Amino acid sequence: MNLDPQLLDAAHKGDRKAQYALYRSCFPVLMAVCMRYRRDEQDAVAALNLGFLKIINNIPSYRRDKVPFEAWIRRIMINTAIDEFRKEKKWRELTVFADDLEKAYPEEPIVWTEPEKRLDIQQLEAMVQRLPPITQQVFNLFALDGFSHKEISKMLGMSEGTSKWHVNSARNKLKELIRSAEMNA
């Protein structure tokens, strides 16, 4: 995503046309991030708008020479989604408190099987959307965004073992859903 530096400067200075042009340029990238963390499109757009406001307000802190703009806005959007999730206490699940979880679910990269690789991306996204909210969020952070269990535990205020439990739970549920989809195909 290559943006004109003057567009960023004008957007920060309050030029509404520049802000709108920036919004339109960033919308596909930001919406993809938001849809991974929100259950429906309306909530995703609300989170996107909140995150975009943070982007506009923080443009002066963006280091053009250090970080690609797309990576910078993705990080802001992920943090916004996490912050919003924390605010929604009614959606929180009970967490598992067991010291042995870290031993039971060691940190491993996710390896996709051949049937899983053949899945259509929309099918896989729909399956991930069917996961419980906190499990979906932890899975997205770990498998799609590449955060470690240590980082996830700090972001979401849970133990590393609980993070590992959620990733393992997501894997098992997704395997079930994939098997079910293969049987119905």
Image (cartoon, grey):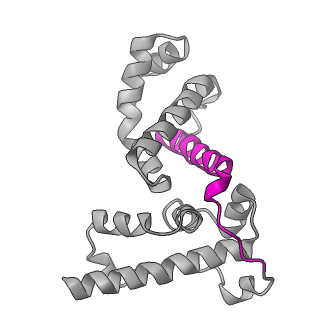
Q: Position of residue 165 (x, y in %)?
A: 64, 78
Quadrant in the rendering for residue 62: top right
Position of 145 relative to 116 (above/below): above
**Residue 109 appears in the rendering:** no
In the rendered image, residue 33, in percent from the top left (x then y), is placed at 46, 49
Q: Is 100 situated left or right of 42 in this image?
A: right
The residue drawn where x is 54% and y is 43% is: 77
> Outermost residue toward the left?
185
Q: Is residue 92 magenta?
A: yes
Q: Nearer the viewer, residue 74 or 6?
A: 74
Q: Which residues are magenta?
A: 70-97
In the figure, residue 107 lies in which quadrant? Answer: bottom right
Residue in front for this viewpoint, 32 or 7:
32
Q: Is residue 82 shown in magenta?
A: yes
Left or right placement of residue 27 versus residue 105 in this view? left
Q: Main secondary structure of the magenta part?
A: helix
Give the residue furthest to the right: 99
Q: Is residue 173 above or below residue 150?
A: below
In the rendering, at what x and y percent does residue 3 appear?
Answer: 40, 28
The image quadrant where one finds the N terminus is top left
Give the quarter of the image for residue 105: bottom right
Compared with 58, 130 (above or below) is below
Task: Mark yes or no: residue 132 visible.
Answer: yes
Residue at horizontal 45 percent and vertical 44 percent from the top: 44
- Eyeballing the image, is 6 above or below 31? above
Q: Residue at the spot x=42%, y=51% of the render?
A: 35
Q: Left or right: where does residue 25 sit relative to residue 96?
A: left
Q: Position of residue 174 (x, y in %)?
A: 43, 78
* Quadrant (top left/top right/bottom left/bottom right) for the C terminus: bottom left
Residue at 41% across, 28% down: 23
